[in-house]
Structure formats: C-alpha cells, structure tokens
Image (tube, rainbow, N blue to C red):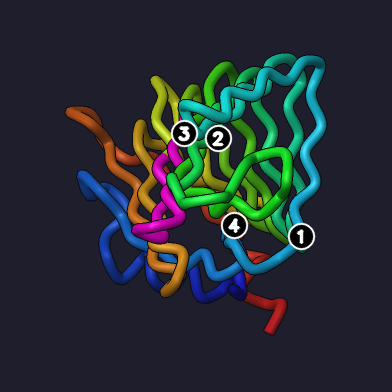
Amino acid sequence: MAAAGIGALIIASGALAQATSSRMKGMQLSNDQPIQIESDKLEIKDPESKAIFTGNVKVVQGTTTLQAGNMTVFYKATEGATITSGNADIDRIEVSNKVFLSSGAQQATGDTGLVNLTNQTIVLKGEKVVLSEGKNVFVGCQLNVQMDTGEAQLEACGGRVQIQLDPQSRKQN
C-alpha cells in the first residue's frame, strides 16, 4: 500500500475522528504457506489441540513477521491431525506480552493480539496500539484487520485516534 494512499484516505476521513480506516494488504498469516516459529519454550497439548510458545516468540510466514512474549496456537480438531505431524490446520493464534506485527513497510504494535485464520481477522489491543508505515504513524487502542481484503480500522476506545503524516510520503508515487 502506498503511503500516499494512507494519507489520502486518512485526510478524507478526518484526522480527528473516533476511528479511522486504512488498507493493510500485506499483513496476513494463512494456512497455505510454510510457517517458521521460534521461542524459548514449547508445550504441545495434542488432546487440547493447542501449542503454547513462551519467551521471545517469533513467527515468520512469507513477508509477515509476528513477535510476542507468549503465543498460544489453537488447531482445528480434525480426525488424525496432530500438531507434531504438521497436518493440523490453525484455527486461531493468541499473542500477549508486547506484540509486534510487520509486513513490508507496515508495522503494528500492541499489548495483546488475536489472529483468527477461520474469520481471516487480526485484532491488536492495548493501551497504545501503534500502526506505522514509514514516517506515517497512527495511534489508537484497537486495530482490526480483515486479512482477505486488507481493510483495517483503528479505534480510539473512548479517546481519539492520533495521526502523524509525513508530507514527503505523498511524493513517492
């Protein structure tokens, strides 16, 4: 997504709005690409269809990176599918303890997050959720991303969404 596109969309929607929308085409995780996960500790609970990663968790899939202190991966309960065999489909991923999500030039941070692969959504929450692309910065308390369309909405949660736009970003076209 071009930074100029963000700027135009934000300006059109009003910089002092209670919520703002944008496009985040690159921020996706899916069940159809290889995924690499690193952490300090892993606890697999096959009967509960979940895996718990703790300590310096890093997930890389394609151009998307997700980092957090803790991550729990919930798998769809399917006959014969196990986490260790690699044939279990991910239902959702819950992350906490300083969440960082990046893809290309886009980055987002929050306190907790939920990646729902069934609904194709990402939700980051926190006292201060920050979305940035280059020098353009958007601050709220909840970021909702619809992964299949790239639609994103940043909510203020009682306050106001804060936006800082770099005029130079419009000249990159």
Residue 81 lies in magenta, yes or no? no
Reading the image, the residue beneath label 3 is: 113
Which of marks 3 and 2 precedes in the sequence?
2
Mark-to-mark CA distance, 2 and 3: 12 Å
Residue drawn at x 77%, y 15% as measured from the top left: 41
Q: Amino acid at mark 4?
A: Leu
Q: Position of residue 40 (x, y in %)?
A: 81, 16
Going from the N terminus, do you reach mark 1 or mark 2 first?
Answer: 1
Give me the C-alpha separation between circle 3 and circle 1: 21 Å
Mark number, residue 34 = 1
Label 2 sits on residue: 73
Q: Is residue 134 visible?
A: no
The alpha-carbon separation of the residues under discs 4 and 3 comes to 13 Å
- Mark 1 vs mark 2, CA separation in Å: 15 Å
Asked whether residue 117 is drawn in magenta, I would say yes
Three-letter residue code for mark 1: Pro
Residue visible at 64% across and 68% down?
32
Q: Are marks 4 and 2 in contact (CB under 8 Å)?
A: no
Q: Nearer the viewer, residue 14 or 100?
A: 100
- Quadrant position of residue 59: top right
Instruction: Mark 4 or mark 3: name the one nearer the start of the chain.
Output: 4
Check the image and report above or below for 119 versus 72: below
Amino acid identity at mark 3: Gly
Seen at 39% across and 30% down, the residue is 125
Label drawn at residue 29: 4
Work out whether mark 1 precedes mark 4 in sequence or the reverse, and give the earlier one: 4
Look at the image and give the residue range highlighted in magenta: 113-123
Q: Position of residue 91 (x, y in %)?
A: 45, 48
Report helix, strand or loop for mark 3.
Answer: strand
For the C terminus, the quadrant is bottom right
Frontmost residue, 2 versus 43: 43
